[in-house]
Image: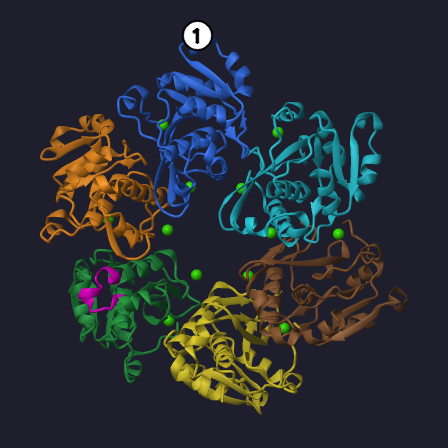
Chain colours: A brown, B yellow, C green, D orange, E blue, F cyan
Amino acid sequence: GITPYAPEMYKEVPSPGVAVGLAWTQMGGEILFVESSVSKGSGRMILTGNLGEVMKESATTAMSFIKAHAEELGVDTDKIEKSDVHVHIPEGAIPKDGPSAGVTMLTSLASIFTGKPVRPFLAMTGEITLRGKVLPVGGIKEKILAAKRAGMKEIILCKENRRHVEDINTDYITGLKFHYVGNMQEVLARAIS
Amino acid sequence: GITPYAPEMYKEVPSPGVAVGLAWTQMGGEILFVESSVSKGSGRMILTGNLGEVMKESATTAMSFIKAHAEELGVDTDKIEKSDVHVHIPEGAIPKDGPSAGVTMLTSLASIFTGKPVRPFLAMTGEITLRGKVLPVGGIKEKILAAKRAGMKEIILCKENRRHVEDINTDYITGLKFHYVGNMQEVLARAIS
Amino acid sequence: GITPYAPEMYKEVPSPGVAVGLAWTQMGGEILFVESSVSKGSGRMILTGNLGEVMKESATTAMSFIKAHAEELGVDTDKIEKSDVHVHIPEGAIPKDGPSAGVTMLTSLASIFTGKPVRPFLAMTGEITLRGKVLPVGGIKEKILAAKRAGMKEIILCKENRRHVEDINTDYITGLKFHYVGNMQEVLARAIS
Amino acid sequence: GITPYAPEMYKEVPSPGVAVGLAWTQMGGEILFVESSVSKGSGRMILTGNLGEVMKESATTAMSFIKAHAEELGVDTDKIEKSDVHVHIPEGAIPKDGPSAGVTMLTSLASIFTGKPVRPFLAMTGEITLRGKVLPVGGIKEKILAAKRAGMKEIILCKENRRHVEDINTDYITGLKFHYVGNMQEVLARAIS
Amino acid sequence: GITPYAPEMYKEVPSPGVAVGLAWTQMGGEILFVESSVSKGSGRMILTGNLGEVMKESATTAMSFIKAHAEELGVDTDKIEKSDVHVHIPEGAIPKDGPSAGVTMLTSLASIFTGKPVRPFLAMTGEITLRGKVLPVGGIKEKILAAKRAGMKEIILCKENRRHVEDINTDYITGLKFHYVGNMQEVLARAIS
Amino acid sequence: GITPYAPEMYKEVPSPGVAVGLAWTQMGGEILFVESSVSKGSGRMILTGNLGEVMKESATTAMSFIKAHAEELGVDTDKIEKSDVHVHIPEGAIPKDGPSAGVTMLTSLASIFTGKPVRPFLAMTGEITLRGKVLPVGGIKEKILAAKRAGMKEIILCKENRRHVEDINTDYITGLKFHYVGNMQEVLARAIS
Ligand SMILES: [Ca+2]
Ligand SMILES: [Ca+2]
Ligand SMILES: [Ca+2]
Ligand SMILES: [Ca+2]
Ligand SMILES: [Ca+2]
Ligand SMILES: [Ca+2]
Ligand SMILES: [Ca+2]
Ligand SMILES: [Ca+2]
Ligand SMILES: [Ca+2]
Ligand SMILES: [Ca+2]
Ligand SMILES: [Ca+2]
Ligand SMILES: [Ca+2]
């Protein structure tokens, strides 16, 4: 794949709605971008990027979490009702699936609805539940190496994935800072300031 | 699978809408969480978690039961009409099907619409019908052992499943309390106080 | 299958919307329950219970018959328009299909919309047409034996199925009373008083 | 199949919306009933009876013809807009397809919307086009023999099917009167008085 | 197939909405009729006649062209918004697909919305684009011979199909007049006067 | 395929909504036209031309980008809400898929909504993301040769595709001017003046 690198990316003014996730493919780990935009509408959600059913369900779950916690997250529910939100993951030619982009989707949506950009050089991976729990996911080693290759500096993971990080040779991950979390409130506290 | 354990779970303030069910997979028994949330809407239902057709029908049936018995259950029908309700069962990567989560779905929905949390350390399994009957289900032994492993203390079952419990070596189930029921009114009396 | 038995069932106060049908499976005959409930809505119909296309069409046809004959049946058309009706047939794990539940569905719907319960210990089987004709169906012997086993006392059949009853050894069906009908008006006169 | 016979059928008061068609199956010819009913609604069409795509398209085409020629046919367009119409063909267990029920569907719909019953002992077969042309269909011999067996006395066919009637041994069709037509106006003039 | 012949067809008063196309099947060329009708509605389009996806897209494209050029074509946009339009191609038993009926569909739609009949004894074939370009299509020889057999006198083709006509033995096409066009404005100038 | 050539095309007055893309098929490179039109409507999008899922997602993403950047692009959001937009890619018989028409679709949509035609003799290829990034695509050599054959003079490509152009023998591409871009703002600055 043709991956945009972080150093170049973060030269630009950061725009709300873009969050960096970590994917695990047959080719190894890779970073992926979750991009959200809103426009005047009626509360609908559009999902593109060749997403499978499970990944689409992650986005739906993320959106319901935001609606149910709008006040706590500083999101205007009026804005949600009067907008359509579009979540896209490049690259369209590659089918994507699985629940592990859940935290990234929720972060991207929280960013677009609050108007606050996501912290630069930060990547994340983890399943979310409707309650906002973060669940552990697979492929941690490959994902972390991909984050490092792409210039990321901080990584958010489920605390139950800590042991998978501790199994990695420390030479490979020097310079990376890890945040282990149990729920989405902790993710958003780290990701959106 | 990576199961969150009950002791940790119940350290938190219990939140309405979460109920614990029991599933029976090729890997043995397992607990599952049914999570419901509501947001401003127009009476629609969203179902996620890689659910098969039969399991989705259980949720639809549970919702119709609540609508038809709203007054008796202390649920404001206005709230139902002006909300969208989302029912999610983690983990998204695992396909789930069958009718045995019926009682858990109905309990989760009754909890979110009344705002009252489900009793802690309580698990349940059983099919529901539109009248509110509870029907017996399979895999009782495996499900009960999983509940015990996960730290559950009480289990609600259909009374026609009593004989399957009585077939289990009592050593395996000491400390568990069983409630045998015939209809949803009995389930909710036990589960939501 | 795990069949609830009639004697127990009829100890409860009968509730409108429940009618007993007769099904013919590879395992022999069986009784089935058709359950209907209504809630505030906009005239939609929800069908659950793992129903095939033909069985769903029976329910649609039954509903159209009730709409077209609302006055004659004592049903308030305003109630129909302002309600959603849900028809469910337990048990969700078993796929069900075919037109022979037509009379039971129409009886269940007539019962829920008039608020009058169906006569106890009564079972029925037969296809319906949009005009309200009752058409004969197969598996009569197996269905009748199942009705007797389940404690039923009266059975409604299409008059063109009379000869299939007369072929059964009378020892097997003593105590059962048969009603042979040609149209839905005759069914409802027997089933709902 | 279990065919209701015409003599019995026509003892009853004829009801608008029922028209007799002729079908050609692997078992030979058969009569079929097209039944229409209307109820308060919003111009939707419901099609049941295990109908294939082509047969459903015939019903859609018939309805559009009636809408486009409402005035000429004496149909109140207000009634069409404020009604849902249901077209059903018994028997639900038998899949049905093909365009040859077009004339029967249009006759049934014209009958229900004008409130005038279809002439008794009359059967028909033929494809319709949106302009109201009647096109010839196959299986004429088998269909006519089935009509005769069922007690029909008059048959409407496309004029391009005349030669198929003339090929039948006259002994088989004595007592049957044939009407050959080119368009729907001629069908309706014969069928609905 | 059973093709209606032009001489008979044009004895009748021509009705708006009917245009003659040319199809190319495994059996050789054939004429086909595109029939449109409008009724009171809300801007929806109904497509019947056993049409494949590509052919349905031609109709959608034709309708968009008419909407975008309504003023130029003398079509009242109010009429479009307040009508449903139905496009049908007999014969329903024959699956039809491909883009070559585009010009015929656009002509049929322009005719029904302007109320002006299509010129008699005129057939046409060609793909359309949303801009109104006419693109060349295949099977020219077979289509032209079919048009001649059916009594057609004029044929509209894409100018890039001229060389396919020039390859046909002139004996076969005497008496036929060809119009070569590049866009829909030229088609409609010839077809609807 | 039968490709319209640029010289002829640009003799006409250029119409807004038409943009030239480059496709890569088993037969080599080819130019393709993306055509957009708008009509009075309610914000819906119609996509035709035998487009696969990924290509449809490109169009959806392009439309969301335009909505989110309407002001910056000089597009009236009222016009978007009160229009239906149709995007078509001839030729309907050829299935098309992949993300590389993204830039062309966005250009076509920006052109139709601003009313400004696309610069003549300009072709382009590239995936877009929801943020407006342009991503590199495959088949560059074949696409460029096709653009030259069709008479194009300028080509817009992703800057990460520059090295694929530099690998082409310069004899093949004399007279072509290349514009390398990173985002959609740069594309539109070149394409629509
Ligand atoms: Ca990549
Ligand atoms: Ca997809
Ligand atoms: Ca698990
Ligand atoms: Ca699924
Ligand atoms: Ca059973
Ligand atoms: Ca099903
Ligand atoms: Ca029959
Ligand atoms: Ca069917
Ligand atoms: Ca033909
Ligand atoms: Ca079809
Ligand atoms: Ca081509
Ligand atoms: Ca397609």
Measured as percent of width and height from the top left, residue D36 is found at: 24, 51
Within 10 Å of disc 1 (Cα), the crowding (few <14, some 14-19, many 20+) is: few
Residue C160, picture quadrant:
bottom left
- Tell me the quadrant of the picture where the C terminus of chain F can be found: top right
Quadrant showing the N terminus of chain F: top right
Q: Residue at x 21, y 58 (%)?
A: C132
In the figure, C94 relative to E81: above or below?
below
**Image: E149 above or below C49:** above
Residue that appears at 68% across and 55% down: A89
Q: Nearer the viewer, residue B68 or C12?
A: B68
Q: Is mark 1 within 8 Å of ligand 9?
A: no
Residue B29 visible: yes
Q: Which residue has dot 1 on it? A: E171
Q: Position of residue F83 (x, y in %)?
A: 52, 47
Q: Which residues are magenta?
A: C66-77
- Type of amino acid under label 1: Asp
